[in-house]
Image (cartoon, rainbow, N blue to C red):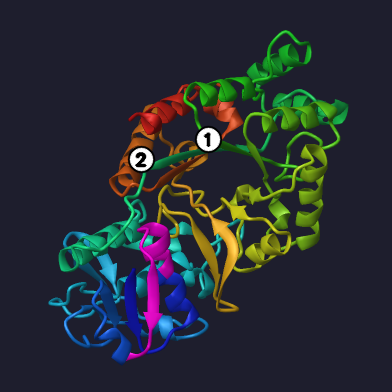
Amino acid sequence: MLLVYVHKITPRVTYIFKHIFFRMLGIQVEFTTKSEAFIPFKGPKISYALKPLFDEFNVKPHKLLFEQGVSDLEIQLSDWNGITCFFQTAPQDEIPFDVFAASFYLISRYEEYLPHVLDQHMRFSGNESIAFKNNFLEKPIIDIWALRLLDKLKVKYPSLMYQERQFKFLSTIDVDLAFAYKHKGFIRSLIGYLKDLSQLNFSNIKTRTLVLLNLRNDPNDTFNELLRIHEHYNLTTHFFFLLSDYSSFDTNNSVNSTIFQSLIKSVADFAKVGLHPSYYTMKNFQKLNKEVKRLEEITNIPVKMSRQHFLRLKLPDTYHHLIDLEIAEDYTMGYSKYPGFRAGTCTPFYFYDLDYEIQTPLRIVPFAVMDATLNDYMGLTADEGLQKIASLLQEVKNVNGTFVTLFHNDTLSENERWRGWSGVYEEVVKLATKA
């Protein structure tokens, strides 16, 4: 057990100390505001105070964890033995910055509550983030800080009991479009032909015709291959299905299609299935609720996992709606345009609500990389994309964190923009599951 002295125990203090010590490092932590109880304590201890009370490990606090609400904080970056940090204290301190306040700033997504420029989909843009602007987006910086803090504490207190972190790999698959050509109905198929014709896309016309005549498999129907890979590598995988009404941004197969419903049921027999809330659910509770009920009616299982389509996330509104619907885990925490660690960590965490100053029951599982980011936004080849994924994987392995990938079923299709990419997913799985 680690005893922490702090002059005032706030919800922010409790949240971030318990996250770093208990959930990340496996160390039980207790708090006290009484120096007469802290000073004689013989076990490992930390004072979160402007100066040590005696000879204990000390971290000097920034004001952030004792405030409420959000304010425009002045943040200056510094270096801690080669790694970026902020909320500096003094160079001679055991930890030369407030590691707890800095971690809270990133993991609470504090900066997303401040005024910022939205992208074309009304999302917080990655290039607005402190991590992107200061070149540490591709490092799980909170995990690095936490392990360095642990090393310091082990020197001070060799008897400190902690739990060794174990690397984990979690594959997640978004199903935006289960079938590229099949099971769309006459009107949508006709519109597809007219669109291909207007663009003189004769290759697509040929493929569409062969698929509709059952002379070729639908290119997006890669589910048997995905399940084969997952079984072969004994892989934990989550599928997120889009179950919206049709819109220009939500073009999946009709939720009334018995073939589509059967697909969802069959996948649910072999993997965990969650909801992919549609484009307009970001701030629309009624629409989100409707889609949750749709998935529950298909699977006969309560929906506990979600990831927003287009990664459209409005803090804290979207998370409030998920909590109201008793969604337990959300997998949206990442950027469309950039790979890396949006919340500064590769460790799942509970959403801290800055509006109400409480830790919520919603568990956030951040992902490190999305296939479309590498192909569509960064313009990488399949080999270059694999190299980028391998680099991020190594960053997570270095801190024994949880490496979460986001692929789509059509990435394996070899259709249109995904030509040359069909083997990337299995190569990633091989790398991530290799001992």
The percent position of residue 157, horizontal first and vertical second, equals 19, 67
Q: Is residue 362 above or below residue 424?
A: below
x, y percentage for residue 300? 79, 41
Answer with left or right where residue 198 lies relative to residue 385: right
Above or below — where is 430 with respect to 149?
Answer: above
Q: For the N terminus, which image quadrant?
A: bottom left
At numbered mark 2, what does the secondary structure look like: helix, strand or loop?
helix
Q: Amino acid at mark 1?
A: Thr
**Is residue 386 in the magenta section?**
no
Image coordinates for residue 199, horizontal then vertical, percent: 67, 28
SS at circle 1: loop
Q: Earlier in the sequence, mark 2 or mark 1?
A: 1
Residue count near mark 2 (Cα–Cα under 10 Å), binned few <14, some 14–19, many ≥20? many
| Residue annotated with mark 2 | 393
Q: Residue at x 30, y 91 (%)?
A: 36
Chain part drawn in magenta: 18-34
